[in-house]
Amino acid sequence: MPLAGVRRLHGAGGRRMQRRRRRLEERGAMQRCTPGSRPQSRRSGGAFTTLLLTVYTILSKVHSDRNVYPSAGVLFVHVLEREYFKGEFPPYPKPGEISNDPITFNTNLMGYPDRPGWLRYIQRTPYSDGVLYGSPTIENVGKPTIIEITAYNRRTFETARHNLIINIMSAEDFPLPYQAEFFIKNMNVEEMLASEVLGDFLGAVKNVWQPERLNAINITSALDRGGRVPLPINDMKEGVYVMVGADVPFSSCLREVENPQNQLRCSQEMEPVITCDKKFRTQFNIDWCKISLVDKTKQVSTYQEVIRGEGILPDGGEYKPPSDTLKSRDYYSDFLITLAVPSAVALVLFLILAYIMCCRREGVIQLVHHSAIQKSTKELREMSKNREIAWPLSTLPVFHPVTGEIIPPLHTDSFDNTSMPLMQTQQ
């Protein structure tokens, strides 16, 4: 499988070369300051500098754009390996040094925010490799497709970028006339894209089908077909659809799923009886009820002749727009009517509301009654200040219990009796 190349962002390669050159200059200055240094060491240091710059130039050329040449109608897989990008993020690891920074990838068609419709991308975690996969279409044959790949180091937030140029070639006998799609329940899409696993599956299909040519056409996750995300128990998988194509008719084993007995078992959600299932069962758990067999040699014409009748209008010929000699129309009167009628209605409603609120208010009578009550209360309060009333018995003169003398009342006549309590404190 092709490996991913690398191209640093603008200015990143130059900064790296400057840092290396500065280190080498400091190393050369230290050698010049060391007692007993000889010109031969300086010459060797200069040669070492030239060697490093030459090696770096070669490595920079290696990280240029990468060209791949997939065939139309054949599965294309391109792995974005994290190990290939780790050397581009500072601090640069030394040979043999292990770094495990989380790295994610972003892929898009150059000049567009997303990838082409036939190309998919998956990366399960930042600590796993990314995979570009898909089946190129015949419409893109001969047109280079440039994919921008940007790697993000999630620890240092550094980025690295390079271009993947996909040159789609036309395949022989495209498309293959006989195509079969299998649903594998115990696999995820990134597991199925591995070269070893896909090779084992194609080998099992070849043993059952016995074709001369067998190609993997496409791989699709069950989630892209409306499947549900599996529960994280018992190591459950999402499932994957694998479409393969061959140049010979389907074998009798593959045709067994079409017999009435197996169709009845599938309708009852039971496993069909397939004789060649044991050749897949050791590694692949195939749902034979979801297998799809397509014979491209039996193309059914979908063209239907149009019969004119009810619901179909007769051909009226070409459209003829109206001429420029039409008379102009005056919309002034229409404008006045449109504006005057709503204004008149609004004015009438305003007058009715004003009459109800101002001329027939029940609150006016209540205000008059309240004013009369308030006036009467004020008059009573003024009159109560001048009235003379008999004192209560408790306020009349009493005898002193010791001397027997008569004690005068507590209050005088000049006291404001409007605030006098009825019961007075006796001495």
Image (spheres, rainbow, N blue to C red):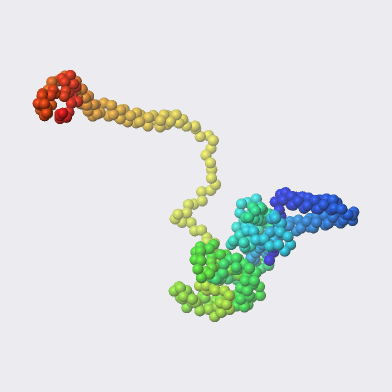
- How many marks the image carries: the answer is 0
Point 53% across, 34% down: residue: 325
Relative image position of residue 421 (x, y in whole percent): 17, 28
The one nearer the camera, 427 or 237, is: 427
Question: Residue most toward the right?
Answer: 39
Vertical position of residue 395 compared to residue 277: above or below: above
Point 40% across, 32% down: residue: 338
The one nearer the camera, 48 or 9, is: 48
Relative image position of residue 124 (x, y in whole percent): 58, 62
Relative image position of residue 312 (x, y in whole percent): 47, 54
Vertical position of residue 412 compared to residue 96: above or below: above
Relative image position of residue 159 (x, y in whole percent): 66, 53
- Name the side, left or right, on which 293 lies relative to 87: left
Point 73% across, 56% down: residue: 64
Asked whether residue 38 is in view, the answer is: yes
The one nearer the camera, 375 or 359, is: 375
The one nearer the camera, 402 or 343, is: 402
Q: Quadrant of residue 291?
A: bottom right
Quarter of the image with the N terminus is bottom right
- Name the side, left or right, on which 324 lies relative to 381: right
Quarter of the image with the C terminus is top left
Q: Quadrant of residue 92?
A: bottom right
Question: Residue most toward the bottom?
Answer: 275
Point 53% across, 69% down: residue: 235
- Name the side, left or right, on which 103 lies relative to 372: right
Asked whether residue 137 is in view, the answer is: no
